[in-house]
Amino acid sequence: MKYFIYALLIVVMVGCETPFFSTADNIFRTPFEKSDGEKSSEYEEVIDYYKDLAKEFASISFKTMGKTDSGKPLHLVIYSPDAEFNLAKYRKDRTIILINNATDGLGIEGVDATMVLFRNLAQKKIRVPDNVIVVTIPVYNISGKLRARNYSEADYDLNSDLIKGDVENTFSFVKIFQEVQPDIFIENGFTSKKEKDFAHSLTYSTLQKEQQGSFLGGYIDEVLIPRVTDTLLKRQEQFKNDSLPKPFWRPLLIPTTDTPRSTVGYASLWNCMAIRINTHSYHQKPYKQLVEANYEMMKAIVEVANANNAYIKQLKIKQAEALTSLKEYPIRWEIDSTQQTTVDLHTFEIDTITEIVHLDHNKPIVKQRTYYNKLKVADKVSVPESYIVPQIWDKVIDRLKANNVEMTTLDKDTTMTVSSYGIDSFKTVAIPFEGHYLHYDTKVAVFEVKKHFLKGDYIIKIAQPAKQYLLQTLEPQAPDSFFNWNFFDIIIQQRLIDELKEEYKEEDARLLFSYPIYRIK
């Protein structure tokens, strides 16, 4: 696959930016601003605030979009500079950015930062992005926000639920994502436990370029993040009295190899650039500082996307064409230990060492940090022409439908020769993970079989926008496949094994674990 030659893209920053905090006479000051940056907005305050914005400004739309496990609905807010909210009209010509907040219920900085961003856009306090539509889910984990806890009402991690869909929130999120079809997805998160020696208020992570795709991944690495950083550095010079420390202005990369179970991993399946912004609340950094950092990075991403709009659209076409031409698809990656790079880590000198290391926050230093920046393919599959999913697997079909997978049904009973997998081996976690005894390291064998299918069974062609989603869920070897998430555990229960051994006399052990999704070459 050839790499696209990146054209020179220049982000021109002219004029003065509006200060982060709104003036006292602004009737649309957020609860966060009214507290002088000391507290976050309560959930009901967030929703009422967006409702009020939508009533006052034609450029803001507020919609109810589905259920959550809290009993409260999920919402969608859209900023469109010309007050057109039919996103399908803009999909070819404008960059659509979707911002998701509070997947972790304690990750509230993004909630307040996004409120300020939408207010400033609506009031034209910052440069109006003519080529960008900004969309947000104000609060995704509503139960977590209400109860000040990371997890959902039933203790699920919503950032691990995008494939298995155990929580109502997930189906509502998927509905929103499929309706919006964003070009850039921003997940606003936080951390309070890891990387305790950071001076940085904020870090970001993206999928490695190999996972994201050479065109979109290359754009993130070589254009988007460098230009966002340049924008922030210029803004640092404008705001001499800003509360943000210098390390923020050059955001620190924390590499990730997220799989499709996460919001970032899921978004990348749909020809979408995905970025996770993490604020760092450890060491009791001022809340205002964390919100401001989050706001500034989102605003910078909007500005760069606005300037690069036409180029982003070209890259998405190139990426889609590259995916279409793939004959083999990587379903699992691993770190290439032969490839590494270094970044500047702003931290502190060691003060004392007892049972733990204590740092002196009055003595900042810069260290070189090494990380592995390349992946290599650990497993891949040939790309079929189609899949056949028997209608009996209704939970799988429900999730395919929720993701707008294009399917047709057989109009009569039919016998045909198809490729089938035999599950040769797999491993299973010792204790439940997110409510499942997750399988992993699944190995398969392929064989041809004549199979009788029923009227109403589903035929799914691979040549469609859901191509990567299908390969990552229907191929049993994929880390987040439906098989590994236990959707087909009935085929491996002991009763069936005993019956099959009797029937097949162990002539072909692969038939004992016959995977019930079939491939047409």
Image (cartoon, rainbow, N blue to C red):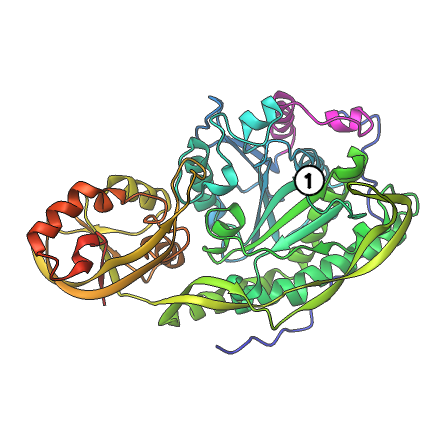
Corner quadrant of residue 207: bottom right
Main SS category, magenta section: helix
Q: Quadrant of residue 148?
A: top right
In the rendered image, residue 160 lying in the magenta stretch gets the answer no
* Residue range (magenta): 28-57
Q: Is residue 267 left or right of residue 24?
A: left
Where residue 260 sits: x, y (%)? 46, 51
Q: Quadrant of residue 117?
A: top right
Residue at the location (62% across, 72% down)? 339
| 227 versus 432 height, above or below | below
* Amino acid type for the residue under numbered disc 1: Lys
Residue 43 lies in the magenta stretch: yes
Picture layout, residue 35 above or below residue 416:
above
Left or right of residue 260: residue 103 = right
- Give the number of callouts: 1
Q: Secondary structure at mark 1?
A: loop
Residue located 61% across and 65% down the image: 219
- Mark 1, Cα crowd under 10 Å, few <14 / some 14-19 / many 20+, is few
Instruction: Identify the residue at image location x=40%, y=58%.
Output: 468
Q: Looking at the picture, how far across and down is residue 279, in whole percent? A: 71, 42
Q: Position of residue 410 (x, y in %)?
A: 14, 51
Is residue 317 among what the camera can see? yes
Q: Is residue 151 above or below residue 343?
A: above
Residue 431: image location, x then y, percent: 43, 39
Which residue position is annotated with label 1? 193
Does residue 90 show up? no
Quadrant, the C terminus: bottom left
